[in-house]
């Protein structure tokens, strides 16, 4: 009787551990995709904007392509009530957060919120330090699915950062709702080494992206970017080196897509020389972010996109590379003054090959596949032109200045 009882307890312990392991594994098994309010709206967000963005994501077919989150960034907060519960700004969100979350959920989408591991956020709004449990419960009660947790106003040492992110991750886990955690300390304390362990599903690897190609400086570490305005190429330089750390449920986050902003909207994306990019450069960002299994967070005004932007963001074959269930970030296998070449292994044995022309001129790319370490691949598809062709041991193609070509290579 006693033995049976003990076996019973062991079995149920095993089952419940297994269930919770499965539950944990179910959080962001592929990089999250959606719309993030920051680059276009800055702090000037409100419920009407969020609703119309959710509507546009559905109408434009972006939700069905996998962009199924609306991420509310900084600027939503209205302080705390007399019980210290965090509240939204009543002018910006007069219907309250629960109603807005319900609306976004009713569209078949998920929704994220933003806070900071200090008394105030980067924008100077109420944040969550010392209110972690209470705020996590509030976010859960409202129905949020994701928290971006920023680090402005917090001490610079590693220990404090790790402790503060651990605390919020635990609070979210105990909040009664599955809420994913995006760590945002800009790569300064190498969160790729500890982000997953403390309970995060992704971690920013760099300073904020601006709407530009490059700041023109040599970038070796995240702090080299502070104050210079990170362009697409600068962020690539830092994030490309971190391929070993990306894993299922633990993604490197090289920040939002600037695709389609065209330097038009004013701060924050136009700060620090963010004057806009060419369509080739935007196409490169999409290509490189997909190769790097990055979160895909659109920030241009999806209610008013031009054809080029729509085409870049809606590339199904490329999105499939980003979302591939093997969960590998591409390795950069070549870097010269003209070329950068990336290889991403895929779940079905195919590989994605990316070739970026970093030079200021259009260039003819000729690469022997075996020299790139690619063997036994006979067929290819160009994921931008959709053209399919047989490989004869090499890739030969004209690539425009700052353009990235992406191919899916298969055996037969
Ligand atoms: C920081 C983050 C940005 C954005 C702003 C909001 O700068 O890195 O992504 O969230 O704060 O104030």
Image: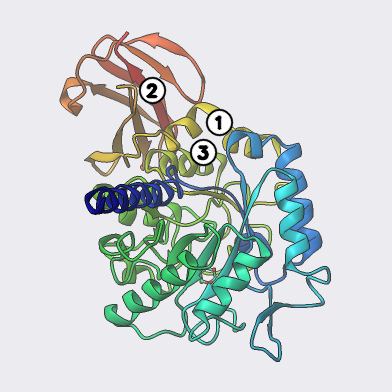
Crowding at mark 3 (Cα within 10 Å: few <14, some 14-19, many 20+): many
Residue sitting at 70 percent across and 47 percent down? 302
Q: CA distance from mark 2 to mark 3?
A: 16 Å
Instruction: Calculate the distance from the C-alpha at mark 3 to the C-alpha at mark 1.
Output: 10 Å
Q: Mark 2: which secondary structure?
A: strand
**152 vs 109, nearest the viewer:** 109
**Residue linked to disc 3:** 283
**Residue at coordinates 82% horizontally, 76% vertically from top-left?**
91
Q: Nearer the viewer, residue 186 or 135?
A: 135
Residue drawn at (41%, 41%) of the image: 288
User: Would you say 223 lies left or right of 301 here?
Assistant: left
For marks 1 and 2, give the CA distance.
13 Å
User: Mark 2 Cα within 10 Å, few/some/many (few <14, many 20+)?
Assistant: many
Q: Is residue 109 above or below residue 254?
A: above
* Disc 1: residue Cβ within 8 A of ligand 1's nearest atom: no
Residue identifier under label 1:
315
User: Tag 3 or tag 2, which sits nearer the N-term?
Assistant: 3
| Left or right: residue 285 compared with residue 69 | left
Where in the figure is residue 402, as x and y percent of width and height?
43, 41
Q: Earlier in the sequence, mark 1 or mark 2?
A: 1
| In this picture, residue 184 sits left or right of residue 187 | right
Q: Quadrant of residue 313?
A: top right
Are discs 3 and 1 less than 8 Å apart at CB?
no
Instruction: Give the number of the mark in front: 2 or 3.
Output: 2
Residue 156: x, y in percent? Answer: 33, 83
Q: Considering the numbered disc 1 on the image, is that residue within a helix, a strand or a loop?
A: loop
| Depth check, front residue: 269 or 248 | 248
What residue would you read off at disc 2? 408
């Amino acid at each position: 009787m006693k033995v049976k009882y003990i076996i019973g307890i062991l079995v149920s312990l095993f089952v419940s551990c297994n269930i919770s392991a499965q539950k944990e594994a179910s959080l962001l098994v592929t990089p999250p995709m959606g719309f993030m309010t920051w680059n276009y709206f800055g702090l000037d967000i409100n419920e009407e904007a969020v609703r119309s963005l959710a509507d546009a994501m559905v109408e434009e077919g972006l939700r069905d392509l996998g962009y199924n989150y609306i991420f509310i960034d900084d600027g939503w907060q209205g302080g705390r009530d007399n019980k210290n519960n965090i509240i939204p700004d009543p002018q910006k969100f007069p219907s309250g957060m629960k109603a807005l979350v319900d609306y976004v959920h009713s569209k078949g989408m998920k929704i994220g919120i933003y806070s900071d591991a200090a008394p105030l956020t980067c924008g100077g709004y109420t944040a969550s330090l010392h209110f972690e449990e209470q705020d996590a419960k509030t976010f859960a009660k409202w129905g949020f699915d994701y928290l971006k947790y920023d680090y402005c106003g917090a001490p610079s040492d590693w220990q404090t950062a790790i402790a503060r992110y651990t605390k919020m991750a635990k609070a979210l886990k105990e909040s009664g709702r599955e809420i994913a955690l995006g760590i945002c300390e800009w790569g300064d304390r190498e969160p790729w080494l500890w982000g997953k362990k403390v309970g995060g599903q992704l971690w920013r690897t760099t300073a904020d992206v601006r709407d530009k190609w490059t700041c023109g400086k040599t970038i070796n570490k995240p702090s080299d970017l502070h104050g210079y305005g990170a362009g697409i190429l600068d962020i690539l330089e830092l994030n490309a080196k971190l391929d070993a750390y990306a894993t299922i449920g633990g993604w490197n986050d090289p920040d939002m897509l600037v695709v389609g902003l065209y330097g038009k909207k004013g701060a924050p994306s136009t700060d620090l020389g963010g004057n806009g990019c060419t369509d080739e450069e935007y196409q490169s960002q999409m290509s490189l972010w997909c190769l790097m299994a990055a979160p895909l967070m659109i920030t241009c005004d999806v209610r008013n996109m031009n054809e080029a932007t729509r085409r870049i963001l809606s590339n199904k074959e490329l999105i499939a590379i980003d979302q591939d269930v093997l969960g590998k970030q591409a390795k950069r296998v070549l870097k010269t003054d003209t070329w950068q070449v990336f290889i991403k292994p895929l779940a079905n044995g195919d590989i994605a090959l990316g070739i970026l022309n970093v030079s200021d001129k259009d260039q003819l790319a000729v690469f022997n596949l075996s020299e790139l370490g690619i063997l036994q691949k006979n067929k290819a598809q160009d994921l931008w032109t959709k053209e399919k062709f047989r490989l004869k041991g090499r890739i030969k193609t004209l690539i425009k200045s700052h353009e990235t070509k992406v191919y899916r290579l298969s055996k037969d």
